[in-house]
Amino acid sequence: MSGSLQLWPQQASGHAAQLDTFIMAFTVFVALLVIPVGVLVFVFAVKYRRGKTVDRQHAPNRKVWLEVSWSVVPFLAALGFYVWSTSLFFELRNPPSDTLDIFIVAKQWMWKAQHPGGQREIDELHIPVGQPVRLVMNSQDVIHSFYVPALRVKQDVVPGRVSSLWFKADKPGVYWMTCAEFCGTDHSVMGGRFYVQTADEYAAWLSSSGVDQSLVASGEVLFRKYGCSGCHAASSAVHAPDLAGLYGRAVALASGETVIADEQYIQDSILLPQKQIAAGYEPIMPTFKNILRDDEVIQLVAYIKSLRPASWRVK
Amino acid sequence: MTVGATLETPSERASYLRAGYSLRSWLTTTDHKRIAVLYLYAITAFFFIGGIAAALIRLDLATPGGDLLSNEGYNRAFTLHGVVMVWFFLIPSIPATFGNFLIPLMIGAQDLAFPRINLASWYLYVLAGLFTLYALIAGGVDTGWTFYTPLSTLFANGYVVAALLAVIIVGFSSIFTGMNFIVTVHKLRCPGMTWSRLPLFVWSLYATAMILVLATPVLTMLLILVCIERLSGIGIFNPDLGGDPLLYQHLFWFYSHPAVYIMVLPAFGVLSELVTAAARKRIFGYWFIAYSSVAIAVIGFLVWGHHMFVAGESTYASAVFSFLSIAVAVPSGIKVYNWIATLYKGSISLDPAFLFAMGFIGLFVIGGLTGLMLAMLAVDVHVHDTYFVVAHFHYIMVGGAVTAFFGALHFWWPKITGRMYNITWGRITAALIFLGFNLTFFPQFILGYLGMPRRYHVYPPEFQVLHVLSSAGASILAVGYLLPLIYLLYSLRHGQPAGSNPWGATGLEWTVPSPPPKQNFAEMPVVTRPPYDYPIRDPMSRE
């Protein structure tokens, strides 16, 4: 038999430590509810065994206040834990503003990552220690789920949706990353190594990984190559929405709704342009669904995100 | 049928087992007791098919490389295990066998309200089973029992449509059974059998029947949509065509979360009967138990979203579903305290049925409270889709529902067959199942917290020790599940005649001979006493 008996997962982040504290406190709570049950079953089974002489008079068959108390007290205690765990969860769902964004594409059966500088890797992910990292994830086929046990985080990656996940790892090391949502034949071998590196190591890794261009630079090339600039450039004669400063802005739609222009919105506008039409524009944009590869979509989204309003147009 | 042929005592001559011996007399029967026995045969067969798949899975996981099966073969094995165990064992087990057999006897009726529909639902069950076996023999399915899209619609290999049809058909069987129970409980209670005198087993099946009738149609429609999508590609769940894969999950769990209560509510009902009979004492808090069954059935419809905390559901929706899940988990877990309080000052006999009940209480409490852990958002993010979840729902479904099924089998076996089985072997079995179960599934909580995802055929070697423990436990569990097959079947030929009330229990079913006559009651009973009306004992009594 290979491998030693491990009983607690590694911790690679502050969140992992907080969750471990929570689970230990909760285990104590559960034990307080379970142990009396186990003890009393045995005590009663022995003490009141049939054939034993023992006082059985005045056996109660209802005591409303007893029932209410043993229902309400655990419920209130559970609510305390609810508040605690929900606040941890809200932290997981609200990334800080200074995250390093790394793009992930999941497909049967591999994780493909692209760093902002254009570096790519498969079934490995290098990230710097102490820096909030946000993963922006797409799936090409079925639902996958990105999972790093040492960080205690996971997020499903659903086709057609941009999923995101953020964490701040604070212990350098090599951890296991994997897929948690059943995704077909080779589900159990989808995954690999998750490297948490010091800033210097990460910089060295970035520079040693060969890249042609950064994501933004490749996106800019694609922006021209596929003719996006023909309509969306400021000088264009076609009436198309201006993309400068789009990212993060509220966009009014023809349907009357308003959406925040996040990665999901930008990607949908490229692949499913009829889904959300910006108010005041004709629905004339064609889909690029079968034209762009998944990594090209990521590059285009990165480029569009990078477009800041030109200085002379700032209001 | 040899079951009836071997029973020779004169008092049993008029029993339902002797009302015709031919196969035809069984296959065209409308007697609820015979239909219950037909279900018992069919369900037992599927329990062993699902069990063989489970054994293959555990054997394969004894090594990190999964040397027994291929990746594909492993996926097909766990899909088969899930589909068979959920739809062909857990959901129908207690309602279709013990519910069919006991509801009319417990409420003083001659049969269910719709005897022919009852028979039809058994045939639907068998037909659905044949579809499943076809899918199995033809090559299997690799979607998992949840059939998540777009895997099941666009990418899965195997006989997905045949498996879906099987689940759709068995769903109709469930709906028929549920409808039959509801009408029977409303219309066929004998004089004096008021709602406040209804046995708690009937209350729990009444609540279960409401879920069956209200939730199953959602699953049926959903799976029909999946079939259509798989065959014609219309794009309801395909994002490329504007569909939404998460729509599938919402609808699936809208059925499948209440389905968990379809599995455990009947088990609660069984437990209430077993505990009162073993303690010879009126149950503690009759109304709390009766109403909480109904409340669980209702609130169970509001918590499906807790299966989707990491799927892409909004943060606030998750927070609400988390709260509602705690609201339903606490009362259902606390029910256990009522059974414990029932034992206080009782006259407890350690019969096999009671040992199974004790086992149920221990396992269900662990399953229920780990469910509470899973309802906590931050915990779920870490352990969702890991072995923690696998361990949790096996504690509920196998530790809970299956243990209750075995408890019911040992409690009502003398009533069904008219024969006693070997009590010692029954006790040994209850102990083996409890030990084997814990050894199998407790290590999986640790595996899950360590981060071992579920449905993994190949895994990192540091998880092996815990997996080997689990596989070893499974072999003990297998012995525990096989033993009753031997001594119960042996009892059919060689068991002592049981008499009408071997356990000294209350309840109308114990007032008729064992096995009951075809017409149940010679004359319509009239109930004048409260349920579980055990005599109040003298102080310092030995009884």
Image (cartoon, rainbow, N blue to C red):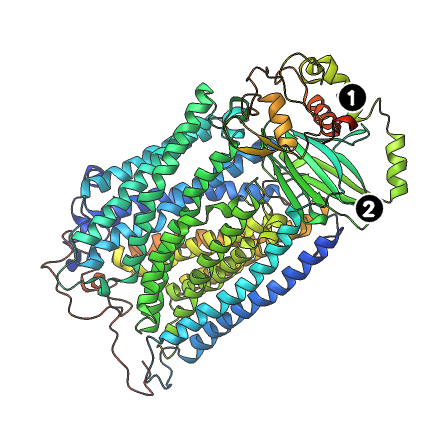
Q: Residues within 10 Å of mark 1 (few under 14, many from 20)?
A: some
In the displayed structure, does residue B14 sit left or right of residue B298? left
Residue position for label 1: A218
Q: Which mark is residue B116?
A: none
Look at 42% across and 60% down and name the residue there.
B332
Residue position for label 2: A129
In the displayed structure, does residue B516 sit left or right of residue A216? left
Q: Residue furthest left?
A: B523
Look at 34% across and 42% down and name the residue there.
B42
Horizontal and vertical percent for residue B239? 54, 26
Q: What secondary structure is found at the residue carrying circle 2?
A: loop
In the picture shown, does residue B185 fall above or below A240?
Answer: below
Horizontal and vertical percent for residue B175? 30, 41
Q: Tell me if I can see residue B146 in this picture.
A: no
The amino acid at mark 1 is: Ser
In the picture shown, does residue A253 fall above or below B306?
Answer: above
Q: CA distance from mark 1 to mark 2?
A: 27 Å
Horizontal and vertical percent for residue B129? 37, 35
Q: Nearer the viewer, mark 1 or mark 2?
A: 1
What subunit carries mark 1? Answer: A
Q: Between B495 and A284, which is closer to the camera in this rendering?
A: A284
Q: What secondary structure is found at the residue carrying circle 1?
A: helix
What subunit carries mark 2? Answer: A
